[in-house]
Image (spheres, grey):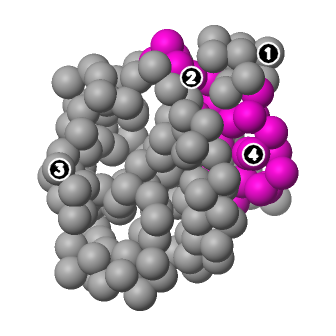
Amino acid sequence: MSNRSATRKTVTALLVVSFTIAVIWTLQRPVIPSETLEFSLIDQPARSLADLQGQPLLVHFWSTTCGPCLQEIPHLKTLYRDLAPEGFEMVAVAVPTDRPDHVARLRRAQSLNYPVALDISGTVNRAFSGVPGTPYFVLIDSRGQIVKRHLGPWPETDLRNRIKALLATGESADALA
């Protein structure tokens, strides 16, 4: 193997490791967005993060072109239907690249029963330290503390159990993180 080939492999390996560390670090950072952060909801008045404090909140970043995001819609609808009466709140935030008319059309076509927000400027995305991909979830306890970040489809039973634990205690679920 030549020195040039070995150098390329080393550089490639370092880039992969660096990227992996950056993603893990981002997912683990407990950055708490400002309470003044506003969600621009479709078909509803805007709501701030402060409006949603005092109850467990799931912020779900998704896209109309994300297959796994679309596959999760039925269980997210069921989750919201079942747990919202107990004090659970959720906001599904469409990524900035989604066209507003596509988001609105999908919301109507899928009869989404939970709040859906547009993030055209990327403000919400940045407030949560960037979204590494979709689907991406941020679970926040009733005190406004981030207790879990999850990239990729979130198994329904695990998600439901974590939210129910937050509802049962009304406190931070640090043990669940």
Q: Nearer the viewer, mark 1 or mark 2?
A: 2
| Residue, disc 4 | 160
Name the residue located 41 percent from the left edge and 87 percent from the top edge: 109
Q: Amino acid at mark 4?
A: Arg
The residue carrying mark 3 is 45
Amino acid type for the residue under numbered disc 2: Asp
Quarter of the image for residue 18 reads: top right
Quadrant in which the N terminus is drawn: bottom right
88 sits to left or right of 123: right
The segment highlighted magenta reads 139-165
Q: Is the residue 112 above or below the residue 124 in the image?
A: below
Residue that extends furthest to the front in the rendered view of this protein: 85
Dot 4 lies on which element? helix
| Pointers 3 and 4 in contact (C-beta within 8 Å) | no
Residue at (62% x, 23% y) in the render: 147
Instruction: Classify mark 3: residues with Cα within 10 Å, few (<14), some (14-19) or many (20+).
Output: few
Q: Do callouts 4 and 2 mark residues in contact (Cβ within 8 Å)?
A: no
